[in-house]
Image: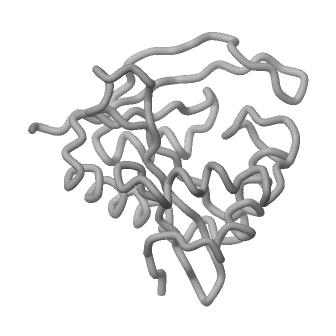
Amino acid sequence: MVTIRKAVIQDLPGLVEIYNQSVLNNTATFDLNPVTVEQRRQWFDLHDQNELYPLLVAEREGKTAGYASLSMFREKEAFKSTSEISIYIDKDQQGYGIGNQLMTAILELAKELDYHVIMAGITKGNDISIKMHEKFGFQFCGELKEVGQKFGEWQSVLFYQLTFDN
């Protein structure tokens, strides 16, 4: 059984552990070096203190299994109805539908918060993430070619967006 809830500060070490799995093992993030709990504290506080940018945690069998967040898309005021989504799942918790449950919950919050557009930046080649976003109605809207270098290779970012009728 999976429980989805608002993140609390006690979750931060587990969230950092999950994030660092991607830092070290895949291109889901363009960070090249693992982050510390202290370094991620400001990120956590931004989500914890601003109701416009929720941070949800998935727990499975008493363990932090993944998380989802909405973040500011761009700083200009005209973008205030647009948010960027992020979802990370623990490598040992993948395949249990946790990503789908987090996506459902965070998109429900996005609607309640009256967002019009949700953006997702997905590194090219991350087919599992692409399929999940498409399943929820996200549509491809552009590619930034070779904008980052990780693991000795140029990486491109695909942008997907979901537009709510509001």
Give x and y (percent) for residue 91.
Answer: 72, 63
The structure residue drawn at horizontal position 62% and vertical position 71%, both measured from the top left corner, is 9
The structure residue drawn at horizontal position 34% and vertical position 63%, both measured from the top left corner, is 105
Give x and y (percent) for residue 78.
Answer: 28, 20
Name the outermost residue toward the top.
145
The structure residue drawn at horizontal position 43% and vertical position 75%, both measured from the top left corner, is 5
Q: Is residue 80 above or below residue 133?
A: above
> Which is nearer the eye, 104 or 113?
113
The structure residue drawn at horizontal position 40% and vertical position 33%, both measured from the top left corner, is 119
Give x and y (percent) for residue 116.
Answer: 21, 35
> Which is nearer the eye, 80 or 137?
80
Name the outermost residue toward the left.
166
Scheme by which the image is coloured: one colour
Tell whether 74 sits left or right of 24. left
Give x and y (percent) for residue 35.
Answer: 82, 49
Tell whether 118 sits left or right of 59. left
Q: Is residue 61 above or below residue 6?
A: below
